[in-house]
Image (cartoon, helix red, strand yellow):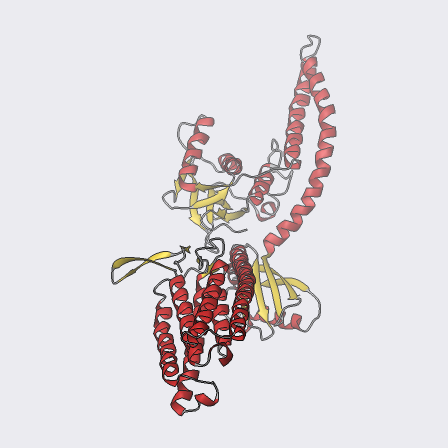
C-alpha cells in the first residue's frame, strides 16, 4: 500500500534537523489526514485516527498473549486443533513481538499513520494465514481472526484500501489452503469454504468502511458543534466583560460563578472575591431577602463609595445546578434611560408644535420687515417694529433648537486623541471670535487620553461650554482653563472647563440643564440642555462642580481604549 497525504499538518524537526516527515500538530485539533491514497476525498482527524490505531495495537498484543501463554502452559492443543506445533509456536511469538514493537512507534507517531496501518494490517494477514496453515486451514476456525483484521483495516483506512485488504486476505486464505496439501489438490469442500470466507472478507470490509464513514461524519459534526460552542462562549464572555451594566451569576451556595468587571466595580469587589459573604453588607442583606422570594425583584442599593446602584434579581430557569442572576446598573444611568424615554415622547409633541408655530412666525417676521420700508412710520412705530423683529428672531431660534432636538440624531463615533484635538479646537475658537490671544489655558494636553465620541458632537458641546465660560467667567481678569484628566472613579477620560467668575448658586445649579431655563435676558435656555443630550448620545456625561472661586463643567467621555457596550 502507498502512503497517504497528510493535510493540516506541520513538518517536525527532530534534534534540530529537518527530517522531511510530515507529522500532525498535536496541539491543532482541526488537523486532518487522508489514510487511503486511492480515496483522496475521505479524511479523518489526526488525533482520533492515532487513538484508533493504538487500540488496534492493544488488540494485537492481547491476541499474541492469548496464543503464547496457553503454549507455555501446554493447554493450547485443547483449544485449537494444532497440526504443526513448532510452526504455530513460532508464528504466535512473532505476533506478540510485532505487537510489542509497534507500540512505541504508535506512541511516537513515526513513521506516518498510513505507513504504520498498512504494515500492521498486512503483517497480521500474513501471520494469521500461517497460523491457519499450522492449524488445519479453514476448518481450524482461525478464519474469524482474519475477518477481524480486515474489519480493523477497513475502519483504520476506509475507502478503497479496505477492499484491498479484503483481496489480500482472500488470496492469503486460498494460498494457505492450497499449500496445506503440499502438492495434493485440496478437496472441493475446502476450496468452497475458502471462497466463502473470502467473500465474507469483502462483506466485512464494505461494512467496516460504511461504519467508519458514518462514525467519521458524526465525529466531524461533533467537532464542528464543539468549535461553534467554543466560539459562542468566547463571544458571550467578550460581550459580558465589556457591558456597562454589571452581570453577577450566583449558585445556591451564594458562590460567584460569573462576575464581569462592571459588576465588581459597582460592588467594590476585587478579583479574589468569590462569595456573596465577601461583598458589602447592603448587597448581602438584599440578596438574602430576595432568595426567600419566588419572583423577580429590583431596588436601589448603595455601593461602597456611596453611589446608588440599581439592582435586579432573577432566577435562571432550566439551569442545573440552579443559578441566580443579578443585573447591576449605575442609578444615574438608569434614571437617564427613563428620562430619555419621557423626553423622546415630549420631543415628538414639541416638534409638531414647533412646526405649527414656525409658519405664522415667518409671516409675522416678513410683514414686520415690509413695514420697516415704509416712510410714513414715526419714530415710536420704528421702535415697536424693532421689538417685533428682535423677539421674532428669538422665537425663531427657540423653534430651530426644538426642531433640532426632535429630529433623530445619529452618531458616528471615532477614537479621538483629546490632547491634539482640543489644541486644534482652541485655535479655531480663537480665530472664529477674532480674539488677539487664546482665552483658555490648556492643562494636561501631554497625557495620552483617548475618547470614543462623534467629533462634531464634541465640538458642539465644547463650543457651548467655552462660550458660557467666556460670558460668565471674567476672562479679562483671569485666564480660563481647560483640563484633561482621568476620572478618579472609573478612569474615563474627562475634559473640564473652568472659569473664575462669580459661580452659580445652589438653587440655580439644580436647573441649569433643564430646557428653556436661563438667567440671561437674551438667552434661549437650550445650550446646556442640548450639550447634555449630545453627551448622553455618546455615552458621556456632563456634571457641574462649584469651586471656591468659580465654576467647573466636567465632561466625562467613553474610554476609547476600553469601550463599554
- Work out whether 481 lies above or below 136: above
Residue 423 sits in which quadrant?
A: top left
Give 456 or 176, whichever is nearer the viewer: 176
Outermost residue on the top side: it is: 375
Give 565 or 478, whichever is nearer the viewer: 565
The reply to whether residue 499 is in sight is no
Q: Is residue 334 left or right of residue 83?
A: right
Residue 405 sits in which quadrant?
A: top right
Q: Is residue 75 left or right of residue 259?
A: left
Quarter in which the N terminus is drawn: bottom left
Horizontal and vertical percent position of residue 534: 57, 40
Outermost residue on the front side: it is: 184
Q: Is residue 3 left or right of residue 504?
A: left
- Work out whether 375 lies above or below 396: above
Horizontal and vertical percent position of residue 90: 35, 81
The reply to whether residue 485 is in sight is yes
Outermost residue on the left side: it is: 16
Horizontal and vertical percent position of residue 154: 49, 65
Give 217 or 161, whichever is nearer the viewer: 161
Residue 299 sits in which quadrant?
A: bottom right
Horizontal and vertical percent position of residue 469: 50, 37
- Work out whether 145 lies above or below 560: below
- Work out whether 209 lies above or below 484: below
The residue at the point 74 percent across, 29 percent down is: 356
Marks counted in the figure total: 0
Amino acid at each position: 500500500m502507498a502512503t497517504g497525504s497528510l493535510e493540516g499538518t506541520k513538518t517536525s524537526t527532530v534534534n534540530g534537523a529537518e527530517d522531511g516527515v510530515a507529522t500532525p500538530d498535536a496541539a491543532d485539533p482541526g488537523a486532518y489526514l487522508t489514510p487511503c491514497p486511492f480515496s483522496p476525498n475521505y479524511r479523518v482527524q489526526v488525533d482520533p485516527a492515532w487513538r484508533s490505531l493504538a487500540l488496534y495495537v492493544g488488540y494485537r498484543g492481547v491476541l499474541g498473549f492469548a496464543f503464547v501463554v496457553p503454549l507455555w502452559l501446554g493447554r493450547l492443543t485443547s483449544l485449537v486443533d494444532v497440526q504443526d506445533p513448532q510452526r504455530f509456536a513460532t508464528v504466535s511469538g512473532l505476533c506478540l513481538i510485532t505487537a510489542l514493537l509497534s507500540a512505541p512507534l504508535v506512541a511516537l507517531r513515526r513513521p506516518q499513520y498510513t505507513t504504520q496501518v498498512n504494515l500492521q494490517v498486512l503483517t497480521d494477514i500474513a501471520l494469521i494465514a500461517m497460523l491457519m496453515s499450522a492449524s488445519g486451514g479453514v476448518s481450524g476456525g482461525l478464519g474469524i481472526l482474519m475477518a477481524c483484521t480486515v474489519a480493523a483495516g477497513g475502519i483504520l483506512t476506509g475507502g478503497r484500501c479496505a477492499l484491498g485488504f479484503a483481496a489480500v486476505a482472500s488470496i492469503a486464505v486460498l494460498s494457505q489452503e492450497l499449500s496445506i496439501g503440499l502438492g495434493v489438490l485440496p478437496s472441493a469442500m475446502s476450496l468452497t469454504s475458502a471462497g466463502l470466507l473470502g467473500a465474507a472478507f469483502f462483506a466485512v470490509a464494505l461494512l467496516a468502511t460504511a461504519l467508519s464513514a458514518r462514525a467519521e461524519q458524526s465525529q466531524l459534526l461533533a467537532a464542528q458543534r464543539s468549535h461553534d460552542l467554543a466560539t459562542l462562549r468566547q463571544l458571550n464572555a467578550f460581550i459580558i466583560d465589556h457591558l456597562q451594566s454589571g452581570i453577577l451569576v450566583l449558585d445556591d451556595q451564594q458562590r460567584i460563578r460569573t462576575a464581569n468587571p462592571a459588576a465588581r466595580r459597582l460592588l467594590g469587589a476585587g478579583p479574589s472575591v468569590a462569595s456573596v459573604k465577601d461583598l458589602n453588607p447592603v448587597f448581602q442583606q438584599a440578596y438574602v431577602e430576595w432568595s426567600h422570594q419566588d419572583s423577580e425583584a429590583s431596588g436601589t442599593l448603595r455601593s461602597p463609595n456611596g453611589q446608588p446602584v440599581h439592582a435586579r434579581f432573577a432566577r435562571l430557569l432550566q439551569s442545573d445546578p440552579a443559578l441566580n442572576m443579578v443585573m447591576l446598573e449605575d442609578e444615574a444611568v438608569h434614571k437617564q434611560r427613563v428620562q430619555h424615554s419621557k423626553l423622546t415622547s415630549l420631543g415628538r409633541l414639541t416638534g409638531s408644535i414647533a412646526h405649527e408655530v414656525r409658519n405664522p412666525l415667518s409671516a409675522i417676521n416678513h410683514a414686520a420687515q415690509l413695514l420697516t420700508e415704509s416712510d410714513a412710520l414715526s419714530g415710536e412705530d420704528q421702535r415697536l417694529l424693532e421689538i417685533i423683529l428682535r423677539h421674532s428672531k428669538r422665537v425663531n431660534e427657540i423653534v430651530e433648537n426644538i426642531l433640532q432636538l426632535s429630529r433623530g440624531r445619529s452618531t458616528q463615533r471615532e477614537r479621538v486623541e483629546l490632547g491634539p484635538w482640543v489644541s486644534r479646537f482652541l485655535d479655531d475658537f480663537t480665530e472664529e471670535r477674532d480674539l488677539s490671544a487664546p482665552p483658555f489655558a490648556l492643562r494636561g494636553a501631554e497625557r495620552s487620553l483617548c475618547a470614543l465620541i462623534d467629533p462634531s458632537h464634541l465640538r458642539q458641546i465644547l463650543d457651548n461650554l467655552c462660550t458660557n465660560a467666556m460670558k460668565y467667567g471674567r476672562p479679562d481678569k483671569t485666564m480660563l482653563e481647560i483640563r484633561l484628566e482621568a476620572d478618579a472613579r472609573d478612569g474615563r477620560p474627562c475634559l473640564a472647563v473652568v472659569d473664575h467668575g462669580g459661580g452659580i448658586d445652589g438653587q440655580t445649579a439644580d436647573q441649569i440643564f433643564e430646557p428653556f431655563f436661563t438667567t440671561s435676558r437674551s438667552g434661549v435656555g437650550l445650550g446646556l440642555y442640548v450639550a447634555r443630550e449630545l453627551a448622553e448620545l455618546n455615552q458621556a456625561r456632563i456634571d457641574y462642580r462649584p469651586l471656591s472661586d468659580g465654576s467647573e463643567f466636567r465632561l466625562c467621555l467613553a474610554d476609547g481604549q476600553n469601550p463599554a457596550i
